[in-house]
Image (cartoon, coloured by chain):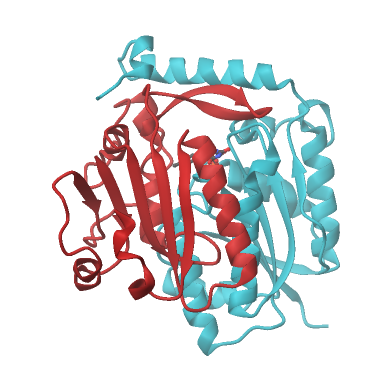
Amino acid sequence: MKPIKVSLISGSPKPLSSSSGTLLDELKPMLSSRFHVNIHSLNKPSVPEESMESILDSDILIFSFPLYVDGIPSHLLSCLYEMEIYLKRHARPDLTVYAIVNCGFFEGHQALPAIELVKNWCYKVGVSWGQGLGVGGGGMIQSLSGVPDGQGPKKNFSIALNELANHINTCSEGENIFVSPNFPRIGYKIGAEMGWRYQIKNNGLNKKDIGRRLV
Amino acid sequence: MKLIIHDLDKIEFERLLPDLPDSCRVVSNDGTIKNCIGCFGCWVKTPGACVIRDHYGDMGEWLAKSDEVIIISKCYYGGYSPFVKNVLDRSISYIHPYFETRNNEMHHKKRYNHTFETSVWFYGDDITDDEKATANKLVIANSINMISSIKGIQFVKSVEEIDGGIL
Ligand SMILES: Cc1cc2nc3c(=O)[nH]c(=O)nc-3n(C[C@H](O)[C@H](O)[C@H](O)COP(=O)(O)O)c2cc1C
């Protein structure tokens, strides 16, 4: 049987240590052993020539990217447009696309417009839409990679990733899923704001500089 | 001030708005824009300004000086074009990194004691109903996050259809 080719694509502009990458690392072991998995990072506004063919020669594409201003980060949007042009010449009607969108805010449902953008892209370029997953609390995802699956603050993430993996493994379409951490929203807010103060001090500034006004 | 963010070429833009008042600032694509690298330097290194010092690093300040923002963008999949989205991605220094809850959702606080109105013109000859529905959701979400009010969201088939009275 021909192996099923799957491309995992991180769309964070950060090539290393991104929440988008961590989510793909978590998803990968849940995928079927029949799959031949390739990993790509699209962190610049253009798809490297050697990646274009490899990505679009897949049977399944899984994009994982951060929510930027309620949408797709602009560099990744440029890449999607390049893919649209490529697909005009090389139609791939049997390709199925899934999207994982992580966002800094607590509520995963804030990723809905970005998921819809990817779905609309699918219709436009003539590939199939699979499913979207919106993950809130993106700021804590990387710190959860050591936590066992399905435990503590990771519980909802693991359930959602498993549900997504089940659809990917059967190459089927599913309803979008939205999750937030199993962690109080106020705790997430306090932790994140402490993080900003820590970073601003590390940069040699004072904590009140955080609200600096230039006008 | 009115801030116009658009992705038209020079000729198209001048045809659309030949007599631009001095009170307008125009953000056009000069081909040099860099993409946001997700460093949050605009919040923790040079608060209020982007650390990338190309021609688009002061969007936060420009938004703070604007009472109206007019966006003219080709519609891509129900959203902005890559250039317009790039400008918006480079604009988060306008808001404060701290969070607050609005409509029972997490959003950022204001950096400036200021708001602006937003009008968006999406153009494209094949914008689908699904794309329009997404674009509406996107602009509403942006207005909540940028603490701005929506003056209008319009879809037109071509730039020529954009009402000359947009100002
Ligand atoms: C330019 C920019 C815009 C952002 N816009 C949003 C947003 O609209 N909503 C949100 O919840 N988070 C937003 N974020 C936060 C990111 O989605 C969040 O930090 C994410 O976890 C980063 O993922 P990554 O590590 O994979 O890049 C934004 C971040 C940046 C840098």
Quick check: can you spot residue A203? yes
Name the residue located 34 percent from the left edge and 42 percent from the top edge.
B68
Position above or below: A202 against A181: above
Q: Nearer the viewer, residue B143 or A201?
A: B143
Q: Would residue A116 be found to the left or right of residue A85 on screen?
A: right
The residue depicted at 69 percent of the width and 31 percent of the height is A144
Say whether residue A32 is visible. no
Q: Quadrant of residue A154?
A: top right
Work out whether A187 lies above or below A9. above
| Left or right of residue A2: residue A79 | left
Residue furthest front as drawn: B165
Going 33% across and 20% down the picture, which residue do you hit?
Answer: A203
Q: Which color is chain A depicted in?
A: cyan
Closer to us: A106 or B81? B81
Rendering colour (chain B): red
Q: Position of residue B129 (x, y in %)?
A: 63, 69
Q: Is residue A174 left or right of residue A67?
A: right
